[in-house]
Amino acid sequence: MFVKDYIVKILIDNGGRETRGLHAFGIPGGVILPLLHSMKLQAPHIVPHLTYNEQTAGFCACGYAQASGKLGIAYAIRGPGIMNMLTSIGEAYQESLPVLFMTAHGDRRTSDKRFSENQEIDLVPFLSDITKFSANIDSLEDLKKVDYACKIAMQGRKGPVFLDFSSKLFNQEVIFEENNTREIETKDDIKSAKEYIYSKLQKAKKPVILIGDGLRNIDCYSLFKNLKIPFISSRASQDLMSNSPYYFGYIGSHGIRYSNFILSKADLIISIGNRLAFPINSKSFRPLFDNKFVIQLDIDEKEIKKEIPNIKYFNIDAKHIDLKWECDKNWLDVCNNLKKELFNCDTTIFVSELEKVIKRYEENTLFVCDIGNNEFWFSRAFEKVRPNCNVLYSKSFGTLGVAIARAIGAYYATGKHIVCVIGDQGFQYNIQELQYLSQWQLPITIILVNNFRSGMILDHERKLFGKELLHVTKESGYSTPNFEKIANAYEIKYIKDIEQLKTKIETPELYEIKIDEDIKLIPYLPKGNLCQDLEPKLENYHEF
């Protein structure tokens, strides 16, 4: 067996023998072509896809990994090709996505020169800080690291890995097929964690479960079926329990009002798969933890070292922790009343428009959101509608323009109709991938939220500089093209009327929502306000 075939076999063995196989994304070049041709011979177990930019290839792999929970694969040529993927690698790292990034190199000779060969850059030292594992594969002995990299990406807290192959290896014969992997084990005992949680629940009068995106790709409804306790979440995990009667929305500086109120009133917070990522000295969230007890369960030991008062950490895999508990009915009544009284707060025109969009889709739909005000409006609309669908965000890295490529990867992972929500600025970042949608006729609906400005930065500039604006409106340097003409140029159906949106499509389409009004992003939490004290203020704030 040649090395190139051996590498492909390892990839397939690590996730490509299921019904949908594996999908890899990238742009070919001379040094990596032998590996791609070996992939092609193994279709449909693994299928390489040509994108139109290396960065979006990485984003496609991220979307594939996020939607499926399986290993994503992205490849690029050496030098500028793989360098174009750096943002994608950062995205995979901060979003905890298992993606294998690959490239290949030719001759590398050490010398006193700045560099010895054109396009040759050793990225391993640099990428070691934003990957779980990075390695140059320069010998047959190094091939042991390929299977290890695939396994390590999927174990424990998932994340990206990087391999740079010597192109001289591809056509050599493999002389071993040794598995050199190790399992990552969490440290704390599940039985002890459960006993401790029950001891605290017995004393608590107002407990809540705070879930995070660490529970994605886990059946939360089954995991928590015996827990009758209020659930709240991070915004990025709002879809994981949204159909449960015990779910009360997402918290945060742009959170749901009743969710933040419930968090403020709780006396016990059980955090599961949530990083508790607020700044430790935040005047908005830190005071919450001075008068309540917190239990944090996390698979990543590095995430349980924060200096939070009144907290007990457990380094465990939460999917094994089956709990059974029913809280006091009075506490549930408080939560339900808060939700009832505050449900219709903060509904702007954009939120209403996105509610109409969401209501058109059924459970065989997957939503993918970009960065900007559009995602916050969408999140609020999703909370109001609560469809039986999932939604994917770029939650930590916040990469503007990621959504179209992520939608492509999510489609190959699930086969579902993908609805991609994106703003006018993010849409222009990686607009070239419209050619991919058009060429392969993917069933992806793009909801283009166009307010003709860089809305999120505009809000921020106003707070800092008043009317002195820069690069956020047409008058200050920002502009948008005619998106209908762009859709036509790529032979993508352009929709003006929401009634034309169909629940099932076979070809891509673009629906543009134009809002001329200068709508600000509300609610928001001013720095220093307690988490429940969102702006604009409620007249009867203290009654809640």
Image (cartoon, grey):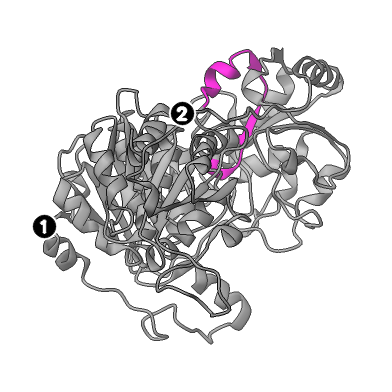
Mark 2 residue type:
Glu
Mark 1 residue type:
Glu
x%, y% of residue 434? 22, 57
Residue drawn 53% across and 79% down? 114
Whether residue 353 can be seen here: no
Quarter-of-image position of residue 210: top right
User: How many marks overall?
Assistant: 2
Label 2 crowding class (10 Å Cα cut-off): few <14, some 14-19, many 20+? few
Q: Tell which circle, 1 or 2, labels the residue nearer the N-terminal end.
A: 2
Residue drawn 61% across and 54% down? 128
Front label number (1 vs 2): 2
At mark 1, the secondary structure is loop
As displayed, is residue 498 above or below residue 11? Answer: below
Image position of 520 (left or right of 318): left
x%, y% of residue 273? 64, 34
For mark 1, what is the residue? 491
At mark 2, the secondary structure is loop
Say the numbered circle drawn on residue 58: none
Name the image quarter holding the N terminus: top left
Is residue 222 highlighted in magenta?
A: yes
Q: Which residues are magenta?
A: 218-236
As displayed, is residue 181 above or below residue 481? Answer: above
Measured Cα–Cα span from mark 1 to mark 2? 48 Å
Residue drawn 17% across and 61% down? 487
For mark 2, what is the residue? 177
